[in-house]
Amino acid sequence: MAERFKNYIGGKWVDARSKETFESRMPADWNNVVGLFPKSNKDDIDDAVKAAKEAFKEWKRVPVAKRGELLGRVGDLMVKRKEEVALLMTQEMGKVIKEARGDTQEGIDTAYYAFGEGRRFFGKTSPSELQNKVAITFLRPIGVAGLISPWNFPIAIPTWKMFPALLAGNTVILKPASDTPALATKLVEIMAEAGFPAGVVNLVHGPGSAVGNAILEHKDIGVVSFTGSSEVGRHIGSVCGKTLKRVSLELGGKNAQIVLDDADIDLAVEGVLFGAFGTAGQRCTATSRLILQEGIHDRLVEKLVKRAEDMKIGKPWDESVDLGPVINESSMNKILEYVEIGKKEGAKLMCGGYRYTEGACKDGWFLKPAVFTEVKQGMRIEQEEIFGPVLSVVKVKTFEEAVEVLNGVEYGLSSSIYTKDVNLAFRAIEDIDTGITYVNGPTIGAECHMPFGGTKNTGNGHREGGWTVYEIFTEQKTVYIDYSGKLQKAQIDVSIEK
Ligand code: UN1
């Protein structure tokens, strides 16, 4: 019998009110059930909001440095349990063990960053326009935060949302992706062990249609943060528009790496392999397009295809494996459909692009990594997010053309340029319309202390990570203190005589 897991509401582990459950299975071996999880609905969200709202009354009064200390303790516990979490990640989500450790480490880094921020939760101080008066700002919590997280970074992204929300003094309800509920449970177990008061951290499993929507519509949730597809993001944004909630949306990408003729070719090949096929291409930041200047094109493609073909596919917990499975069957089918679309559009499939079933891989969603060349601007495989190990190579003549192709999509998350020419590197930084640009590095590898997010349809202008995430989870309070002892009128009592 598969283990049965619970929701965490008001400091207690509880079943869904409906008592219904859903399964989580291993993508690398779908005969294996990781566990059964509560299939919750609006009633469970109502319970969680009640608990979170009650807990907020006290939690917001805990000094921010103390809240930070608790998050530091979460970091310490995560360090101790890093290997156990990473192993579970290979099983439930399917990324290879080295990357699973990295995902967990990103959560640890986020915990320690929040710990530090607890001692520098600064507002601003300004002179007033009047004499004997001063103006200051404080950051205050919003209330109950509803956090909806994806499966591709099943530890890192929930921590990106929960830790800053909690540090700021909000209480939280996490609704994790239904493909990775065990990992979210593990994280919340660790947080419970660290000693958050009951109701401060709540976990509610279940489908987006029921649990997610209940979060969006609940009048006592003040802020929503979502990472996922642009399609779902549009829906979330529109509902939150109606209910006047603050909402942060981190959505799709169609990221590209440019390689100019003068680049270090081997470095560029290493970069694109990691960027395109790391996490089996299932990152918002994944390199989905490779834009090559014509002088380097053929040599680079030759090296790249050889390396892609040699990648070892297998069970993600095996240290020697380069590429694990994709998350589930429908995702695999969608990726394979894109391979067919690419062929029909006239692009040339140089390698991979089919299901890999050899040996131990027969019961998993494994794919051979695909490289398409002769991809033209405007083809669907050049424009649409695929979220799998499929790379489209576009040949260009000039730097200007490269930037134009890179910018010619609806998304703007990450980007990269390989060149030794410092002038062109800086022009790229200026001209590329994305939230993140790497110079001589792949499109993946964002660090927790820096702003993370994108332009255009990648989101709605917020930045997670770094200091900017606190703009999502706080209200600004502006305070004027008048110590003149008389009524002073701003805008009316003009101080400079004519
Ligand atoms: C994501 O793909 O949603 O920069 C997040 C990176 C990781 C985070 C990716 N640190 O690739």
Image (cartoon, rainbow, N blue to C red):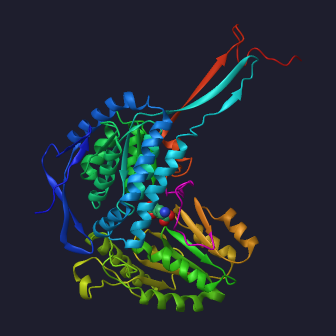
Q: Is residue 219 visible?
A: no
Q: Is residue 204 visible?
A: yes
Q: Which residue is rendered at x = 35% and y = 75% of the image?
A: 335
Q: Which residue is rendered at x = 55% and y = 64% of the image?
A: 414
Residue 209 is situated, as x and y percent measured from the top left of the image, at 26, 50
Quadrant of image for the N terminus: bottom left
Count every numbered label the image shows and give the total: 0
Residue 448 is situated, as x and y percent measured from the top left of the image, at 52, 56
Q: Which is nearer the eye, 193 or 141?
A: 193
Q: Which is nearer the eye, 484 or 421?
A: 484
Check residue 443 for magenta coloring.
Answer: yes
The boundaries of the magenta stretch are 439-458
Q: Which residue is rendered at x = 39% and y = 61% of the image?
A: 153
Toward the left, the furthest residue is 1
Q: Which residue is rendered at x = 26% and y = 37% of the image?
A: 10
Toward the top, the furthest residue is 486
Q: Taking 155 as reference, is 115 above or below it?
A: above
Check residue 471 for magenta coloring.
Answer: no
Quadrant of image for the C terminus: top right
Q: Is residue 10 left or right of residue 444?
A: left
Q: Which is nearer the eye, 391 or 484?
A: 484
Residue 221 is situated, as x and y percent measured from the top left of the image, at 36, 36
Residue 433 is situated, as x and y percent measured from the top left of the image, at 61, 61
Q: Taking 293 as reference, is 102 above or below it?
A: above
Q: Taking 88 as reference, is 177 above or below it?
A: above
Q: Main secondary structure of the magenta part?
A: loop
Q: Is residue 474 left or right of residue 331?
A: right
